[in-house]
Image: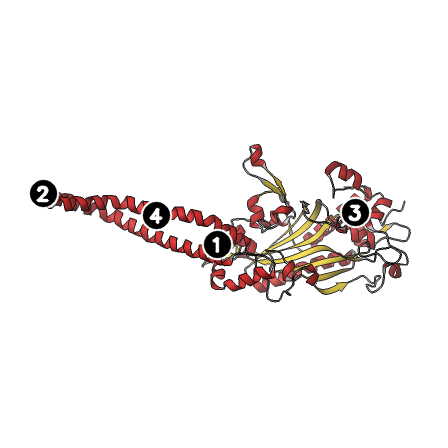
């Protein structure tokens, strides 16, 4: 949620921010509702002050008028009785006026809240303007010594590559047919070394973040209340991508949703809390199952392990002080953690600066990391894929957008600190998501005999195994 005070001061910034993210939001309606709400609250405050003043003064005044009434002549009594009646009726009149204002406020607030939740965070000024992912800008590439990105797979490794679909079939690593039989399209069953490799890459990433980078591990619920999805900015936009469990129709107290990332649970841990500044930054890491409907997704990306309904993800979250420079530093640092993991696993990758049209509602900035996948891309003259980049990671900088929605604040100076509390800043980044991550792992480390070489950094997590597919 955006800062309403900032919106009042510079509405054009938020209008431009929404337009740059290809979103339509009625900012003028928000301003009108907000102005009317503040007008009503001022009137209420005036009436309540009058109510309080009357409560103190009415007793003596009524007593005085009653005394006058006893000694009044018949001609004087009607005027005194009228004044008494008006004085006695005044509290009820004030109460009724306040109630009328309450009713109008109750009508305004839901509409105001709904539009406020729709307003996206404006992109940072240094984010490139663009309409879609096609306008994203490459920042840099990295590749291991044995890979020349200017050459084809065949020229690099001396043989034609198999796609991950062919590799998992030949090495018996995944059973797609039984996955579909059990759960429908875009499901799978990892088998044997395929499942072991999946667990190995997750554990390697998880341990690296804990022991090398000092992140605190947390398990998180993946079935959450709607407030958690709204608070982290995944609702209302993106609601169509979530699985909804309608517990209220079954007699439950509230509906719940399956999360598409551990970020939801990690950020919601401190919802509604006031943290001590001395405890910041909070650095959390989790590994959790994730669920996405992938509504509207179509095309060749739907084949195999690339775009699936259920997966597991190691997710990192940082909650820090409300300082833009600090947020930017953490953004770069979190990306560097992932780069280190990819380099240890010897996978070519590139960093993409996402443009405004590809940021999504909640991000001020986002950097995607894509790994090279030889099985993607258009076919060459021999019918073989030429390879292409595929997204495997995404690092987001959100400033106080999520924390406002979650009412997550900190007190400068700790418990003894003075001054108002401040909303925290938050950031998140995929550390590793599998089994999509198995695509570059299998395709880039395949060998001429059809086996898969396991990078040295990963071998301890495979019980010392050096190859998959070699007896």
> Marks 3 and 4, how far apart in space?
66 Å
Q: Which mark is residue 197?
A: 3
Closer to viewer: mark 3 or mark 4:
4
2 or 1: tag closer to the N-terminus:
2
Q: Indicate the secondary structure of the residue bearing disc 2.
A: loop
Tag in front: 3 or 1: 3
The part of the image, by quadrant, that contains residue 131 is bottom right
Quarter containing the C terminus: top right
Mark 3 or mark 1: whose residue is earlier in sequence: 3
Residue 72, percent across and down?
Answer: 10, 44
Give the label, 2 or 4, closer to the camera.
2
Q: Which residue is mark 2?
A: 74
Q: Which residue is mark 1?
A: 415
Q: Is residue 464 visible to the viewer in this orientation of the structure?
A: no
Disc 4 marks which residue? 98
- The residue depicted at 57 percent of the width and 61 percent of the height is 17
Instruction: State the image coordinates of residue 259 (x, y, percent, origin top left).
Output: 63, 45
Of the numbered discs 1 and 4, the one sitting upstream in the chain is 4
**Within-10-Å neighbours for mark 3: few <14, some 14–19, many 20+:** many
Counting residues from the N terminus, which is met first, the one under dot 2 or under dot 4? 2
């Amino acid at each position: 949620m955006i800062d309403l005070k900032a919106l009042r001061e510079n509405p054009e910034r938020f209008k431009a921010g929404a337009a740059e993210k290809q979103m339509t939001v009625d900012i003028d309606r928000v301003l009108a509702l907000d102005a009317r709400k503040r007008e009503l609250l001022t009137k209420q405050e005036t009436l309540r002050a009058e109510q309080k003043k009357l409560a103190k003064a009415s007793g003596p005044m009524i007593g005085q008028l009653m005394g006058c009434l006893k000694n009044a002549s018949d001609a004087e009594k009607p005027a005194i009785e009228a004044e008494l009646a008006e004085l006695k009726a005044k509290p009820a009149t004030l109460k009724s006026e306040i109630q009328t204002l309450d009713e109008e406020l109750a009508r305004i607030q839901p509409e105001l809240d709904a539009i406020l939740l729709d307003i996206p965070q404006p992109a940072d000024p240094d984010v490139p303007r663009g309409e879609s992912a096609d306008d994203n800008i490459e920042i840099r590439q990295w590749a291991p010594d044995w890979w020349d990105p200017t050459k084809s797979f065949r020229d690099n490794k001396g043989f034609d590559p198999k796609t991950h679909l062919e590799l998992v079939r030949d090495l018996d690593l995944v059973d797609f047919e039984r996955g579909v039989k059990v759960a429908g399209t875009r499901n799978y069953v990892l088998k044997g070394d395929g499942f072991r490799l999946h667990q190995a890459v997750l554990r390697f990433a998880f341990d690296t973040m804990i022991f090398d980078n000092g992140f605190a591990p947390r398990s998180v619920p993946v079935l959450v209340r709607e407030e958690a999805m709204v608070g982290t900015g995944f609702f209302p936009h993106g609601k169509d991508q979530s699985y909804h469990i309608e517990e209220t129709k079954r007699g439950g107290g509230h509906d719940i949703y399956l999360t598409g990332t551990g970020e939801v649970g990690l950020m919601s841990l401190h919802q509604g809390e006031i943290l001590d500044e001395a405890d910041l930054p909070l650095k959390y890491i989790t590994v959790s199952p994730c669920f996405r409907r992938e509504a509207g997704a179509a095309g060749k990306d739907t084949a195999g392990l690339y775009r699936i309904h259920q997966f597991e993800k190691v997710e990192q979250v940082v909650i820090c002080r409300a300082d833009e420079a600090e947020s930017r530093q953490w953004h770069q640092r979190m990306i560097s953690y992932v780069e280190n993991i990819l380099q240890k696993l010897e996978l070519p990758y590139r960093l993409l600066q996402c443009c405004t049209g590809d940021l999504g509602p909640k991000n001020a900035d986002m950097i995607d990391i894509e790994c090279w996948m030889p099985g993607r891309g258009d076919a060459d003259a021999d019918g073989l894929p030429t390879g292409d980049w595929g997204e495997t990671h995404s690092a987001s900088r959100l400033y106080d957008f999520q924390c406002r929605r979650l009412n997550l604040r900190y007190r400068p100076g700790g418990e003894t600190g003075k001054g108002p509390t401040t909303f925290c800043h938050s950031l998140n980044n995929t550390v590793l998501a599998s089994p999509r991550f198995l695509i570059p792992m299998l395709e880039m480390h395949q060998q001429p005999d059809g086996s898969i070489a396991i990078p040295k950094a990963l071998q301890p997590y495979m019980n010392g195994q050096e190859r998959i597919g070699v007896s």
